[in-house]
Amino acid sequence: MTESKPLVSIIMNCHNGEKYLHESIKSIISQIYKNWELIFFDNQSKDFTKKILKKFDDKRIKYFKSKKFLNLYEARNLAISKAKGKYICFCDYDDWWK
């Protein structure tokens, strides 16, 4: 019954994050709270970031790619504009949640 709980938008900005990305996303998916969306903002990655992300077959993960490389604050603001949740939080691609 996740519909009765508020949607949480998780913002993850990434530039060439293949080294840590899998563990970071896995940590989000394994959370007890399930009513979330992951706004994944790819800031012009040149590595296997998108390929790693696509391995997670989860409709809550929303992928967006920047048309050009942006400063972190610009990338975060664009990612936030895509969010639909009542609450917003951040998880960087090289962090994970217990």
Image (tube, grey):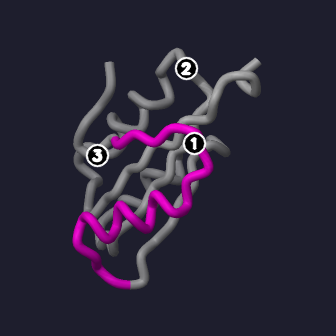
The disc placed on residue 92 is 3
Q: Secondary structure at mark 3?
A: loop
Up the image or down, 92 lies above or below 24; here it is below
Q: Upstream in the sequence, badge 3 or badge 2? A: 2
The one of 82 and 21 positioned closer to us in this rendering: 82
From the image, tell me which residue sits under label 1: 37
The disc placed on residue 33 is 2
**Label 3 crowd (10 A; few <14 / some 14-19 / many >=20):** some
Name the quadrant containing residue 43: bottom left
Q: Secondary structure at mark 2?
A: loop
Q: In this image, 58 relative to 45: left or right?
A: right
**Quadrant position of the C terminus in the picture:** top left
Locate residue 35, reporting x and y percent: 63, 29
The disc placed on residue 7 is none
**Label 1 crowd (10 A; few <14 / some 14-19 / many >=20):** many
**Label 2 crowd (10 A; few <14 / some 14-19 / many >=20):** few
Q: Upstream in the sequence, badge 1 or badge 3? A: 1
- Please report the residue visible at 48 percent of the width from the left and 22 percent of the height from the top: 30
- Please report the residue visible at 42 percent of the width from the left and 49 percent of the height from the top: 11
Calculate the distance from the C-alpha at mark 2 to the C-alpha at mark 1.
11 Å
Calculate the distance from the C-alpha at mark 1 to the C-alpha at mark 3.
15 Å
Q: In this image, 91 relative to 71: left or right?
A: right
Mark 3 belongs to which amino acid?
Asp
Up the image or down, 41 lies above or below 89; here it is below
Q: Which residues are magenta?
A: 68-90
Query: Is residue 77 rendered magenta in the image?
Result: yes
**Quadrant position of the N terminus in the picture:** top right
Calculate the distance from the C-alpha at mark 3 to the C-alpha at mark 2.
19 Å
